[in-house]
Image (spheres, helix red, strand yellow):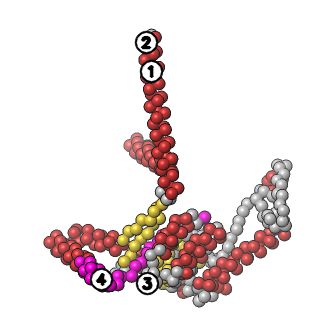
Amino acid sequence: MTAFLAEYGLFLAKTLTLIIGLLLFLGGLAALVERRKEQREGHIEIKSLNDHLEDMKTDIEAAVVDEALARQHEKARRKQEKAEAKALKKALKKGEEPEKPRNRVFVLDFDGDMHASDVDRLREEVTAVLTIADADDEVVVRLESPGGLVHAYGLASSQLERFRAGNIRLTVCVDRVAASGGYMMACIADHLVAAPFAVIGSIGVVAQLPNFHRLLKKHEVDYEVLTAGEYKRTLTVFGENTEKGREKFIEELEDTHSLFKSFVREYRPQLDLDKVATGEVWFGRRALDEKLVDAISTSDDYLFKLCQDCDVYELHYEVRRGLQERLGQLAVSTSDSLLLRWWQRLNTSRLLSR
């Protein structure tokens, strides 16, 4: 019995040592990953839309065109690419100025929420484009947003203003919605394009909040709001709101609306703001009639046409996720997958039992 306990204790000690060593290793690895993340939080990913379309064309030709003819087309394309590369190399070797390349188009995406959370990624993408773009290039932003907080979308709009300040042509494409703060961003564009039924406009300001003062009073609960400054708090959720506070709050809303209209007027002076700055929205074709947009088209069609004459690149700032975040995401994905399988099996068994 004594020998068994001694062997068991030795086994337990070895196991604990192994576990502690593994935890220390994982902790060091996590610290290294986090340190590298602090040094560089993300990177820019670039994809050629021209190459994507060419690959798509090649795949379709392989399926629907005669095999021999498809090979001939592919051979001709590669031959042309080699000839162009050879000519460029020859010109550089002679010290000659190579032919001016085609104009470039950089495509960015902005998917807006209430807090314009995508602005952190957008600012990196804007900076990256500005390091290489010149006056002959164009930036296309595919924008989707129903609006949100004023200060958040003010910052997002300021990021797009950097292109205008850098003399870079800016086109904004709206396929679904650019309203309120979304339109604040969209109106900065030199050229604003919307799909036929995209929702455009909502040049207005709204604020809403519940008030539980009467409920608290009914249950004899006091809620104190202590401020220094007459208008530090105009309306509260739990305190008793006064008519004076409401008037001040409305005054602030009106001032914000006035600033919003001035901002839109700066970039789209052709608008009749008395008519369109009422908080209303218009579908794409109606928005064109009101001069809220410049053209009707989907972003796909607009970019497809640009690919005929320009080199089009999609840019995306990819944030490096920490080890804990990746493990957490893996756990969530695994649990969701297991839950989905369990639900499918449950429904299948119910159908079979009927």
Q: Which residue corresponds to mark 4?
A: 95
Mark 1–mark 3 distance (CA, rounded to whole Å): 74 Å
Q: Are marks 3 and 2 in contact (CB under 8 Å)?
A: no
Q: Nearer the viewer, mark 1 or mark 4?
A: 4
Nearer to the camera, 185 or 352 = 185
Q: Which residue corresponds to mark 3?
A: 136
Disc nearer the start of the sequence (3/2): 2
Looking at the rendered structure, the kind of residue marked 1 is Leu
Quarter of the image with the N terminus in it? top left
Q: Is residue 233 left or right of residue 75?
A: right
Q: Nearer the viewer, mark 4 or mark 3?
A: 4
Disc nearer the start of the sequence (4/3): 4
Q: Give the crowd class for mark 3: few <14, some 14-19, many >=20 residues within 10 Å.
A: few
Nearer to the camera, 191 or 86 = 86
Q: Which residue corresponds to mark 1?
A: 10
Disc nearer the start of the sequence (1/3): 1
Disc nearer the start of the sequence (1/2): 2
The residue depicted at 45 percent of the width and 81 percent of the height is 134
Q: Are marks 4 and 3 in contact (CB under 8 Å)?
A: no
Looking at the rendered structure, the kind of residue marked 2 is Ala
Residue 252 lies in quadrant: bottom right
Residue 102 lies in quadrant: bottom left
Q: Give the crowd class for mark 4: few <14, some 14-19, many >=20 residues within 10 Å.
A: few
Q: Nearer the viewer, mark 2 or mark 4?
A: 4
Mark 1–mark 4 distance (CA, rounded to whole Å): 76 Å
Q: Secondary structure at mark 2?
A: helix
Looking at the rendered structure, the kind of residue marked 3 is Asp
The residue depicted at 41 percent of the width and 75 percent of the height is 300
Mark 3–mark 2 distance (CA, rounded to whole Å): 84 Å
Q: Are marks 1 and 2 in contact (CB under 8 Å)?
A: no
Q: Secondary structure at mark 4?
A: loop
Mark 1–mark 2 distance (CA, rounded to whole Å): 11 Å
